[in-house]
Amino acid sequence: MQRIRLSGSQLETSRFVFGTASLFNAGSRMRRVRLLEAAVESGFTHFDTAPSYGFGLAERDLAPVLARHPHVTVTSKVGIYAPGGEEQGASSVFFRKALGRVLPALSRPVREWSVGRARQALEGSLRRLGRERIDLYLLHEPERAALAEDQWLRWLEDEVARGRVGQFGIAADARRVAPFLAGGSPILRFVQTVDSLENREADKVRERGLPLGITYGYVSAALRAKRDADVPKVLSAALRRNPDGAVIVSTRRERRLADFARIAAASPG
């Protein structure tokens, strides 16, 4: 798969990044890890995860894959956490997700923006991933008004200096990114944001002169607009929309991984 140095970063990744938000739905742990291994075999060199994905299971599923493939890099996030914590077993996660349809509080993510909680979160993510460093560490859908920004900046810069974080920034939709853009926030050193071919949400980031590091949301937006959308065509257009960055994709089916590789190989770059 074609690779690129992400705009606004020193990190080189595959043009498609494998997202793990729905990894838990791929089946047993054996099947999930096999899917992640197949992604590496298909040319993916970067994974996107978070403590809240699979209530901590996504980070744990990645650990053996990252251990076997030291060249593979990873994004994790901070600020949104799993109800019940990130060390739950698969049966507990399934229970919460199933009953959460009736009692939403059981599966509702927990948002907390204290630096103290963030310190614990970083320790937990490093432990679950089995790594000493997270290449991209992003604030997960932050509300700027909720942050003690100076404290966060000092802490994140300290973690970069310690070598436990490669680079930091924000992962959020255009609404949440906007206040950081307007105020010229020093935390906004890397941007991962929602974009679509229909609404072109990421243009607001470009208008501020910031590079688009990673974008996502193209396929889901296209399918909402048109149920029979041509997914390969949408993904090709997504790569053209973000020529200097990477695009997050996801699947629960191994056979689709080769399709992603072919689309990326055919993309100008």
Image: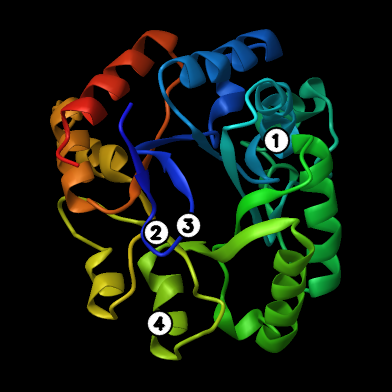
Q: CA distance from mark 3 to mark 2?
A: 18 Å
The quadrant of the picture occupied by the C terminus is: top left
Neighbor class of circle 4 (other Cα within 10 Å; few <14, some 14-19, many 20+) is: some
Q: CA distance from mark 4 to mark 2?
A: 13 Å
Along the horizontal axis of the image, is 230 left or right of 189?
Answer: left
Residue position for label 4: 181
Which structural element holds mark 1?
A: helix
Q: Is residue 257 visible?
A: yes
Neighbor class of circle 1 (other Cα within 10 Å; few <14, some 14-19, many 20+) is: many
Q: Earlier in the sequence, mark 3 or mark 2?
A: 3
Q: In this rendering, is residue 226 above or below 34?
A: below
Asked if marks 3 and 2 touch (Cβ < 8 Å), the reply is no
Along the horizontal axis of the image, is 172 left or right of 143?
Answer: left
Q: CA distance from mark 4 to mark 3?
A: 21 Å
Nearest to viewer (mark 1 / mark 3): 3
Q: Earlier in the sequence, mark 4 or mark 1?
A: 1
Residue position for label 1: 59
> What amino acid is at disc 3?
Gln
Give x and y (percent) for residue 36: 56, 20
Q: Earlier in the sequence, mark 4 or mark 3?
A: 3
Asked if marks 4 and 1 touch (Cβ < 8 Å), the reply is no
Residue position for label 2: 193
Q: Earlier in the sequence, mark 1 or mark 3?
A: 3
Residue at the image position 15 percent from the left and 41 percent from the top: 237
> What amino acid is at disc 2?
Thr
Q: CA distance from mark 1 to mark 3?
A: 23 Å
Along the horizontal axis of the image, is 93 left or right of 15?
Answer: right
Q: CA distance from mark 2 to mark 1?
A: 21 Å
Neighbor class of circle 2 (other Cα within 10 Å; few <14, some 14-19, many 20+) is: many
